[in-house]
Image (cartoon, rainbow, N blue to C red):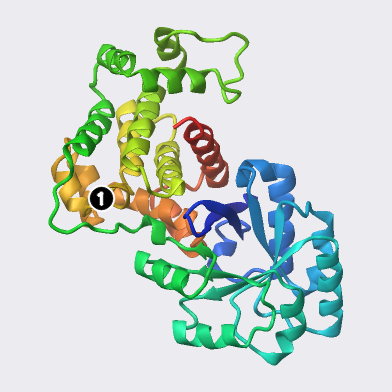
Amino acid sequence: MDTYVARQPIFNLRKKIFAYELLFRNGTANAMGDIDGDSATKTVLANSFFSIGLDTILGGRKGFVNFTSNLLINKVPLLLPKKTIVVEILENVEPTAALIDACRQIARKGYTLALDDFVYNDTWRPLLEIAHIIKFDLRQSSFQQIEDYISRLNNSNLRLLAEKVETPAEFASAKEMGFEFFQGYFFCKPEIVQGKEIPGTKLNLLQLMAKINQPDFDFDQLEKIIEKDVSLSYKLLRYINSAFFAKNHRIGSIKQALVYMGQAEIRRFVSLIAMSNLATGKPNELVRASCIRAKFCELIVGPQADPADRAEHFTLGIFSLIDAIIGQPMEMIMEALPLADTIKQALVDRSGPLFPYLMLVEAYERGKWKMVGPLSVALKLEGLNLPELYLEACKWADSLTTFA
């Protein structure tokens, strides 16, 4: 049975990644109904540590994991590395004497404790005294209610995390209130600059990304583009000689790199570098998320698909967050680019034959498991191992963005 694990980013004040929360479901069948919390956490831990590998899914960052009352009382977190795991205490946990004692022992061992979806209640005071992070759900409580809850906290060492932050305005408001960490998809939303055209330098990069992902783009032209750009050549050679490729010999020329990687992979690398230049001043996770979407879209089409179809799906994913990167409406950006109508239809109108693939990828990355199952069936992807493909996309994106 496949175990579905997605990771949701948690940012600091500078919009840099602080950690990921691991979101879990035990297959698409269970995504359609309830699942026991103990089983969910046990499975996500077993899968993350033994099947996937925690370093792979977290990329060296901290991981927030939900723990139920039973798992806390049995001190299951003590089996895990304290430098990596943040012990997240669910909001439906009853703060009994046994649970509070167990949490104190866990905290004394050096583990970071976070209270999830916090709503103030006097019975939580003992846990507030030992917790390190407190999470407030912006969809569950208003800013006024949260201010009231914060005023009742006596522990000045508590660090505040706002979750389900969905817009740049909510991010700004949470910062003003004293929040230090932020979870949600606000970073995917464009901060539109009204009345301005896309600058020429950015338009050139956008057009380069669009052109090189065309199926009929000439390979010799691609080589010339890379050789003329010293920074691009340097980054490409660093990437091709990295541990990701695990080669026995060093590659020293652009020509060798092109032959070794192949046309499709080189195109993707140039796309990433162009997009990274476009995303200056934006969260690094924006580029990483675009790369994950692109690779995931390509992989779910399957290796048996026509190369042009795989390229089209990759292009769909890589441009799916370009409005947030550029700060302009998607419609304006698409008007300026020579992309297929099916891609533009999916990105601008959110309709057409490609849009369900984008919906599936978005649902998976957000852990909306009730959507993943039906979409997989509708797209006839039941035979695919989506968790494995998602992990492959994450690994590919993490390895690539290191060199951007």
From the viewer's perspective, tell me whether residue 271 is left or right of residue 208: right
Tell me where residue 131 appears, x and y as whole percent: 72, 72
Residue shown at 74%/67% (left/top)? 38
Using the rendered view, name the quadrant where residue 73 is placed: bottom right
Q: Is residue 387 left or right of residue 77?
A: left
Pointer 1: what residue? 346
Q: Residue at x 33, y 17 (%)?
A: 226
Image height of 137 relative to 185, above or below: below
Q: From the viewer's perspective, is 206 left or right of 94?
A: left
Position in image of residue 102 (x %, y %): 85, 72
Q: Vertically, is 75 above or below 241? A: below
Asked if 143 appears above or below 344 in the picture, the reply is below
Point out residue 45 in the picture as x, y percentages from the top left corner: 72, 54
Please give the name of the residue rendered at 27% of the width and 11% of the height, measured from the top-left corner. 220
Q: Nearer the viewer, residue 317 or 308?
A: 317
Q: In the orientation shown, which residue stands out farthest toward the front?
A: 156
Q: Secondary structure at mark 1?
A: helix
* Residue sitting nearer the eye, 342 or 282: 282
**Amino acid type, callout 1:** Ala
The answer to whether one can see residue 142 in this image is no
Looking at the picture, how far across and down is residue 100, in whole percent? 82, 79
Nearest the eye: 95 or 352 = 95
